[in-house]
Amino acid sequence: MRQYGRIETAIWQNPKFRSLSDEAQRLYLYLIACPHGNLVGCFVLHDGYMMADLNWDQNRVRKHVSELVSKGMIERDETTFVTRILGWWGHNSIDNSKSALGAMRVLLSLPKCRVRDEAYQSLIGIGNKYVDEYRDQYASVFAFSSEPPEPDQEPDQEMEMDKGARAPDPVAMAFDEWNALAKETGLPAVQNRDDTRRRRLKARLKDCGGIEGWRQALRKIRGSPYLLGKVKDWRADFDFVVRPDKFSKIMEGGFDDHKKTGGWADLARAADDWSLADETGLPSDQQLIS
């Protein structure tokens, strides 16, 4: 059981936090500091734990969990009860190899689900050297682990399978991964997957070598204050990213955060940038778990 959870004073000025009801604010603070949490901000949390700790009935728990989900503060798998605090790596840090290995093992111990796998993607997306030491070792474990493997088919069964069955659509996967990033960072999600967008996305996938190249681009976006709207009153959207010239610039590091090598620029900027609802994943020596 952990002994404390980090809550920044700037939370009281955060617009998204202030927009919550009083009870949802209380629940959110509980999630950050509750004894069931861990160093990665993603953990199993049954309704009964919250009912006992907060002295709430189940309807009250469900109501305010739903409020936090709808506001983009957390995400939760209702089958496994894996609960993830969005924006965790903007306010917590990993300082050494031991902590990085511990984070990987904590995630591996969680039930397989989409929320767990997105927590892994968030962890490797912070661009930390200690995490990167274990990235290749654990990549195959988490890749699409939320999808159960198909059982081996006997030769005659394979012949009888629906010939119209198709392999996963990489364009659809890329759209989904953009929207997952948008949910974490506050960038605009794609609502309309029209033919023009599909055609442009398919071309960019070809440019970068497929879905893994696309994920590399998303990691670069996650680590770019400029593209996330932290530098001026503008932020990237999907249509900007899939423009040929802009996509090439992203992949070549043209929007990387070259000024920052570790830590927040200063305390004022930290307060301005604070948002547990918006996961920036800015790479720094300070953004690692203590």
Image (cartoon, rainbow, N blue to C red):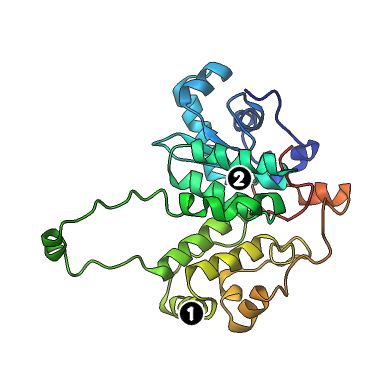
Identify the image quadrant of residue 77. Answer: top left
Please provide percent x and percent y for residue 208. Answer: 54, 76
Mark carried by residue 262: none
Where is mark 2, residue-wise?
Answer: 86
The relative height of residue 240 versus residue 180 in the rendered view (above or below) is below
Question: Which residue, as the protein is rendered here, is positioned at the far bottom?
Answer: 245
The relative height of residue 194 versus residue 140 in the rendered view (above or below) is below
Residue shown at 54% from the left, 34% from the top: 43
- Which one is in front in this view, the residue at disc 2 or the one at disc 1? 1
Please provide percent x and percent y for residue 168. Answer: 35, 65
The relative height of residue 266 versus residue 220 in the rendered view (above or below) is above
Residue shown at 36% from the left, 51% from the top: 147
Q: State how far apart marks 2 and 1 are (Cα).
A: 31 Å
Where is mark 1, residue-wise?
Answer: 206
Identify the image quadrant of residue 26. Answer: top right
> At numbered mark 1, what does the secondary structure look like: helix, strand or loop?
helix
Please provide percent x and percent y for residue 220. Answer: 65, 65
Left or right, 83 with respect to 17, comes to: left
Please provide percent x and percent y for residue 121. Answer: 56, 53
Residue shown at 52% from the left, 50% from the top: 118
Asked if the residues shown at circle 2 and circle 1 are in contact, with their CB atoms under 8 angstroms apart, the answer is: no
> What residue type is disc 1 on?
Lys
Query: Tag 2: Cα neighbours inside 10 Å, few (<14), some, or many (≥20)?
Result: many
Q: Is residue 200 visible?
A: yes
Q: Which one is earlier in the sequence, the residue at label 2 or at label 1? A: 2
Identify the image quadrant of residue 126. Answer: bottom right
Q: Nearer the viewer, residue 148 or 280?
A: 148
Quarter of the picture holding the C terminus: top right
Q: Is residue 40 visible?
A: no
Query: Tag 1: Cα neighbours inside 10 Å, few (<14), some, or many (≥20)?
Result: few
> What residue type is disc 2 on?
Leu
Left or right, 256 with respect to 191, comes to: right
